[in-house]
Amino acid sequence: MANAPHARETVLEAGSIKSRLAKVYAEALIAAAAAQPDGPAVVDALGVELGDFVAGVLGESPSVAAFLASPAVGKRAKAAALQAALPGNASDLFRGLVTVLTTNGRLDLLGGVAAAYRQLLDDRAGRVRVKVTAASELTAAQREKLTATLAAALKQQPVLAVRVDPALIGGMVVQIGDRVIDSSVRSRLNNLRTLLLDKGSSYVL
């Protein structure tokens, strides 16, 4: 157990290194896209292409992501599997990214590159991604009000990703990066339950 803190630090350091590398690749990719004729449109289109591929292939098939990340699988096998998964209309820039990642043995960074690419575009446009979990579907008016409230507080344009979880009972949970704002009924009930349990001995006669 004495080595546990060191092991944890190693994992965290590895994750940080991968994040930095993914950002470097994403920055180079944006620069290459911007240099194309009609650069701004190409930059945006490539972001959509990357996001759709990662969500549709890596997101829907965890086994593929695990395959690409496995050190036990050789470069050729990974490259062949990924090339087979690429759509026929994949752009030259996207295929070039796959080739470079393959050559450098970094195909496991593909998801991170897509995330870093999207973050760079969001930063440029003054957007911020917001995950919202609600007890029921939000109406158009509720979405509009939430968007306006967040925009005023964050000084950025929020992009909402909403999912429904009836287990919340009521209210919602809003996540912005590492920040979580929980205003759900379930959370309030859990807090009350915890308080009662903590103070339970005071009520014993």
Image (cartoon, helix red, strand yellow):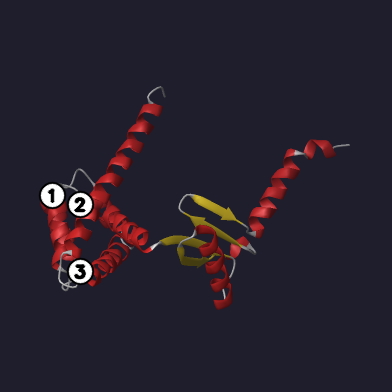
Instruction: Identify the disc placed on residue 75.
Output: 1
Element under disc 1 = helix
Going from the N terminus, do you reach mark 2 or mark 1 first?
1
The percent coordinates of residue 130 (x first, y second) are 47, 61
Q: Looking at the image, is 91 positioned above or below residue 59?
A: below
Q: Residue at x 13, y 53 (%)?
A: 100
Q: Are marks 2 and 1 in contact (CB under 8 Å)?
A: yes
The percent coordinates of residue 44 (x first, y second) are 27, 68
Q: Residue at x 58, y 73 (%)?
A: 142
Residue 78 occupies which quadrant of the picture? bottom left
Q: Position of 167 compared to 194: left or right?
A: left
Q: Nearer the viewer, mark 2 or mark 3?
A: 3
> Quick check: can you spot residue 137?
no
Q: Which residue bears the numbered disc 2?
A: 107
The one nearer the camera, 78 or 117, is 117
Measured in 3D between alpha carbons, the distance from the residue under mark 2 to the one under mark 3, in whole angstroms, is 26 Å
Instruction: Identify the disc placed on residue 39.
Output: 3
